[in-house]
Image: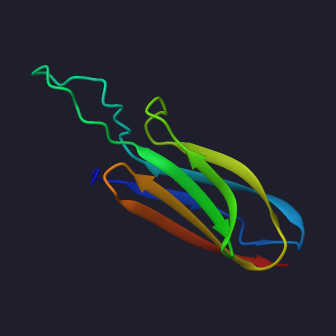
Amino acid sequence: MAENVKPKVRVPKSASAGEVITLKTLISHPMESGQRKDSDGNVIPRSIINRFTCEFNGETVIDITMEPAISTNPYFEFEAKVPEAGTFTFTWYDDDGSVYTESQDIAIS
Protein backbone atom coordinates (compact mmCIF):
# COMPACT_ATOMS: atom_id res chain seq x y z
CA MET A 1 0.00 0.00 0.00
CA ALA A 2 1.34 3.40 -0.96
CA GLU A 3 1.84 5.69 2.01
CA ASN A 4 -0.10 8.89 2.71
CA VAL A 5 -2.60 8.34 -0.10
CA LYS A 6 -5.31 10.92 0.34
CA PRO A 7 -8.25 11.47 -2.02
CA LYS A 8 -9.98 14.85 -2.23
CA VAL A 9 -13.16 15.70 -4.11
CA ARG A 10 -15.12 18.86 -4.75
CA VAL A 11 -18.84 18.58 -5.49
CA PRO A 12 -21.30 21.48 -5.27
CA LYS A 13 -23.63 21.14 -2.27
CA SER A 14 -26.70 21.64 -4.47
CA ALA A 15 -27.80 22.02 -8.09
CA SER A 16 -31.00 22.38 -10.08
CA ALA A 17 -32.50 19.19 -11.52
CA GLY A 18 -30.90 18.61 -14.94
CA GLU A 19 -28.05 21.05 -14.29
CA VAL A 20 -24.55 20.20 -15.54
CA ILE A 21 -22.02 20.61 -12.73
CA THR A 22 -18.24 20.47 -12.56
CA LEU A 23 -16.61 17.81 -10.37
CA LYS A 24 -12.97 18.00 -9.28
CA THR A 25 -10.84 15.22 -7.83
CA LEU A 26 -7.27 14.92 -6.64
CA ILE A 27 -5.50 11.99 -5.05
CA SER A 28 -2.12 12.31 -3.34
CA HIS A 29 -0.11 9.35 -4.64
CA PRO A 30 3.56 9.01 -5.71
CA MET A 31 2.67 7.21 -9.00
CA GLU A 32 5.95 5.33 -9.47
CA SER A 33 6.24 4.08 -13.09
CA GLY A 34 8.52 1.10 -12.40
CA GLN A 35 11.15 2.46 -14.77
CA ARG A 36 13.31 4.48 -12.37
CA LYS A 37 16.13 3.18 -10.20
CA ASP A 38 17.01 4.03 -6.61
CA SER A 39 20.47 5.23 -5.46
CA ASP A 40 21.71 1.61 -5.32
CA GLY A 41 20.66 0.94 -8.92
CA ASN A 42 17.66 -1.20 -8.04
CA VAL A 43 14.44 -0.74 -10.01
CA ILE A 44 11.77 1.01 -7.94
CA PRO A 45 8.65 -1.17 -8.28
CA ARG A 46 5.68 0.19 -10.20
CA SER A 47 3.02 1.69 -7.95
CA ILE A 48 0.28 3.64 -9.69
CA ILE A 49 -3.40 4.32 -9.41
CA ASN A 50 -4.45 2.30 -12.46
CA ARG A 51 -8.17 3.11 -12.57
CA PHE A 52 -10.53 5.87 -11.46
CA THR A 53 -14.32 5.72 -11.48
CA CYS A 54 -17.14 8.05 -10.52
CA GLU A 55 -20.72 6.92 -10.00
CA PHE A 56 -23.88 8.85 -9.26
CA ASN A 57 -26.55 6.85 -7.41
CA GLY A 58 -24.93 3.65 -8.70
CA GLU A 59 -24.74 4.76 -12.36
CA THR A 60 -21.32 5.20 -13.99
CA VAL A 61 -20.42 8.81 -14.76
CA ILE A 62 -16.79 8.22 -15.78
CA ASP A 63 -14.37 5.27 -15.85
CA ILE A 64 -10.70 5.98 -16.58
CA THR A 65 -7.80 3.57 -17.02
CA MET A 66 -4.43 5.12 -16.14
CA GLU A 67 -1.01 4.15 -17.45
CA PRO A 68 2.47 4.58 -15.88
CA ALA A 69 3.10 7.89 -17.67
CA ILE A 70 0.44 9.70 -15.58
CA SER A 71 1.75 12.34 -13.21
CA THR A 72 2.11 12.18 -9.46
CA ASN A 73 -1.08 13.21 -7.60
CA PRO A 74 -3.51 12.76 -10.51
CA TYR A 75 -6.16 15.47 -10.83
CA PHE A 76 -9.37 15.10 -12.82
CA GLU A 77 -12.00 17.73 -13.59
CA PHE A 78 -15.12 16.71 -15.49
CA GLU A 79 -18.80 17.54 -15.85
CA ALA A 80 -21.91 15.55 -14.97
CA LYS A 81 -25.63 16.17 -15.31
CA VAL A 82 -27.54 15.95 -12.02
CA PRO A 83 -31.05 14.57 -12.63
CA GLU A 84 -31.94 14.21 -8.94
CA ALA A 85 -30.53 14.48 -5.42
CA GLY A 86 -28.07 11.74 -4.64
CA THR A 87 -24.53 10.64 -3.93
CA PHE A 88 -21.41 10.80 -6.05
CA THR A 89 -18.97 7.98 -5.26
CA PHE A 90 -15.37 8.35 -6.40
CA THR A 91 -13.10 5.29 -6.42
CA TRP A 92 -9.39 4.95 -7.13
CA TYR A 93 -7.79 1.51 -7.67
CA ASP A 94 -4.10 1.00 -6.79
CA ASP A 95 -1.72 -1.55 -8.36
CA ASP A 96 -1.24 -3.15 -4.94
CA GLY A 97 -4.95 -3.93 -4.66
CA SER A 98 -5.80 -0.98 -2.41
CA VAL A 99 -9.04 0.83 -3.14
CA TYR A 100 -9.65 4.42 -2.02
CA THR A 101 -13.20 5.78 -1.95
CA GLU A 102 -14.78 9.15 -1.24
CA SER A 103 -18.47 10.02 -1.43
CA GLN A 104 -20.33 13.31 -1.44
CA ASP A 105 -24.02 14.07 -1.51
CA ILE A 106 -25.68 16.69 -3.66
CA ALA A 107 -29.11 18.20 -3.05
CA ILE A 108 -31.57 19.58 -5.59
CA SER A 109 -32.38 23.23 -5.02
x and y percent of residue 12 in the render?
A: 72, 66
Q: Nearer the viewer, residue 48 or 8?
A: 48
Residue located at (56% from left, 63% from top): 90
The image shows residue 45, relative to residue 12, as above or below, that is above
The x and y percentages for residue 37 are: 21, 23
> Residue shown at 56%/71% (left/top)?
103
Left or right of residue 18, residue 76 in this image: left
| Direction from residue 95 to residue 84 in the image, left or right | right
The quarter of the rendered structure image containing the N terminus is bottom left
Q: Residue at the far left: name it.
A: 40
Q: Position of residue 20 (x, y in %)?
A: 85, 59
Q: Is residue 90 left or right of residue 77?
A: left
Residue 53: quarter of image: bottom right
Q: Nearer the viewer, residue 13 or 26?
A: 26
Query: Could you tell me which residue is drawn at 39 percent across and 42 percent down?
Result: 48
Q: Tally the marks.
A: 0
Q: State the scheme by which the image is colored.
A: rainbow
Q: Quarter of the image containing the C terminus?
A: bottom right
Tell me the residue at 67%/55% (across/down): 62
Which one is in front, 11 or 33?
Answer: 33
Q: Is 18 rendered above or below residue 44? A: below
- In the displayed structure, would residue 50 be above or below residue 58? above
Image coordinates of residue 98 in percent, x first then y, are 35, 59
